[in-house]
Amino acid sequence: MKSLVDLWCNSAEELAEWCHTCTTSDIKTVRRRVEHEGFSFLTIALPDFCKAFERALDEGRIDPQDFRWSTRLKRGSSPNPGMIPVFLQGFMRQVFDEVSGTIHDEPNVDCIFAIRQLCSLYAKIEIPCSDSRVTRAMQAYVECENELEAWESTVSPDLLSEFRETSRLLFAGVFTSVDSDIYTGDVQPAHGPGSTADGIVGNNKFRMPQWTRRLDSIFPYGEYCLPNWRYHNLLDHVEFIEPGDEMPVKVISVPKTLRGPRVIAMEPSYMQFMQQGVLRSLVRELEDPEELVSSFLGFTDQVPNREMARIGSLTGQLATLDLKEASDRVPNLLVTLMLGDHPWLQAAVESTRSSRAEIPELGLCLTRLRKFASMGSALCFPFEAMVFLTICLMGISKQRGVPLTRRSLMELRGKVRVYGDDIIIPADCVYSVIGCLEAFGFKINRQKSFWNGKFRESCGGDYFQGEDVTPIRLKKVPPTSLKDGSKVKALVEFRNRLYLRGMWKTASWLDESVVSLLRGHFPIVEPTSPGIGRRSFLHYQAERIDDNTHAPRVRAYVLTPLIIGPSIDDVWALFKCLASPVMQEDVRHLERSGRPLAVGTKLNWVAPF
């Protein structure tokens, strides 16, 4: 913990030089608070300060109630001269007026970045939270399900009818194409590397010992799980599961921040396999440039959202919205309405959807899920984006009093975009869109939604008046040895981002620890190099020339993932090669496959570019 506090202090000193101020008292405050409160001060209290600061940027003035802990002074100190919080006041004074608390006409953008950098440095660090916070997260999952049930019993039929008509206008062409793919069997499923509810890992996923009757009615086992029908005799060894006996998704928590965990639902391997197939067809059609809807949705590229957020911070004409518990609040009812005119696609989506959830943490099993799917389902992300886009356009149409047509949609290009639960809409339609979203049971995260001032954020890009003020966050606790390759890589990437952002003194201070950790092997490399090295505006220095290729080489550590079996051969090896040929980059993929048990490091001669 001491090194993390020292990192904060070094960052504060360098940013103070940027902004011609002093952070001596701020550093004393942080050291004292961490000593008494622990790491939670850096991971919870400071990010809360940042949220209050961002809210002040959006509202154009400081609300002292949002900065309660930072306005308290120790006994004997001089009184606070106005509205400015005591903590980080050297930066705050260059953004807000001391007496009125209103934002300056030309606030110092470097100070805005500095405050956000210092308060968000550890906001996303992946560390396990307390058991009580995990329990509360699981209880919130159950409560969300209860709220969906209540919403279904009260929602207006007219509202649902309008939703269906709007989605039909948006996605009819896309759904028709995917519907045809499913009817003709032109679907390419795939396995992911992650864990599954049935505990099957690696190459064993391709053996497919189980299949559901629901899946078999749309995706016959012989068509999708055998190399060809010559091996039909293997059907005798497959367990076909009836609907009432299907395995539920397993709801678990994974480390996210000290504030709370990320809740995901692990799908059975056979469900995940076919979800990936439907996903490929669906995303391919949604991102087809010839489809009008491709202008409003994103699944693989976040840059358009970031650029629109930047433009919104300049013009004020675009708002950025964020939702709470977005994935878990998408009702299956809405997805069913969207797909009502496309029977094959509807049946495919329904057959790949798990309808029950087991929550080991609470000892519960939810027997009839109202939500469409949780994080963990491959189809969760695209369908939540389509649902949000539909509702947002309903709100825009209502605000402007113009019915949605293809022509009016074309006029909205560059003004509306959805990437998951990151939403960008015209600022003049904010309240109408929020009203529509809340009518469908969604909750707006108002702390991360902006439409008034000159601050906007979307998809990891934060901007004020068109200037990038995105903080560089440390995502993992620094490693103590080279054995933890993932942490080593995360630390080096963090250092490189600091360097490229111009925080050279902090990067240089961090270099001492990194060089010691890497035993002196920390060469300059390009981002495409396989070696773990440092970014620099200086050119790399070759340490040797390869005898065979005559190309420059440097001595650097590389990641060495530890993947242990299981191996497959015979029919299942053939099936794997035919089912996903583009995925087989490892020549030993039939001997080992799946997510690495561990990631180590190894010193090697590598290309610096």
Image (tube, grey):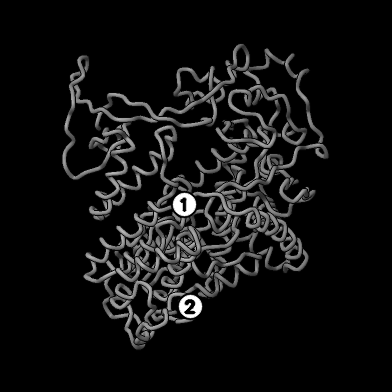
The quadrant where residue 517 appears: top left
> Which label is found at residue 350?
none
Q: Marks 2/1: CA distance?
A: 25 Å
Label 2, residues with CA under 10 Å away: few <14, some 14-19, many ≥20: few
Q: Secondary structure at mark 2?
A: loop
Q: Nearer the viewer, residue 159 or 204?
A: 204
Q: Position of residue 564 (x, y in %)?
A: 54, 23
Tell me if 36 is positioned left or right of 94 in this view: right
Q: Position of residue 283 (x, y in %)?
A: 52, 43
Inspect the image, locate mark 1, and give the three-letter code of the amino acid beneath it. Ile
Q: Secondary structure at mark 1?
A: loop
- Location of residue 62 with respect to 493 vertically, above or below: below
Q: Residue at (49%, 73%) from the top-left corner?
A: 429
Inspect the image, locate mark 2, and give the three-letter code of the amino acid beneath it. Arg
The quadrant where residue 331 appears: bottom right
Q: Residue beneath label 2, please?
A: 68
Tell me if 492 is positioned left or right of 564 in this view: left
Q: Residue at (45%, 66%) from the top-left corner?
A: 33
Q: Nearer the viewer, residue 278 or 307?
A: 307
- Location of residue 599 with respect to 326 vertically, above or below: above
Q: Position of residue 158 (x, y in %)?
A: 70, 68
Of callouts 2 and 1, the N-terminal one: 2
Q: Nearer the viewer, residue 371 or 519?
A: 519
Q: Position of residue 122 (x, y in %)?
A: 43, 56
Q: Residue beneath label 1, please?
A: 125
Q: Residue at (30%, 65%) from the top-left corner?
A: 466
- Location of residue 603 with respect to 435 vertically, above or below: above
Q: Residue at (33%, 75%) from the top-left corner?
A: 89
Q: Quadrant of the C terminus?
A: top left
Contact between marks 2 and 1 (CB within 8 A): the answer is no
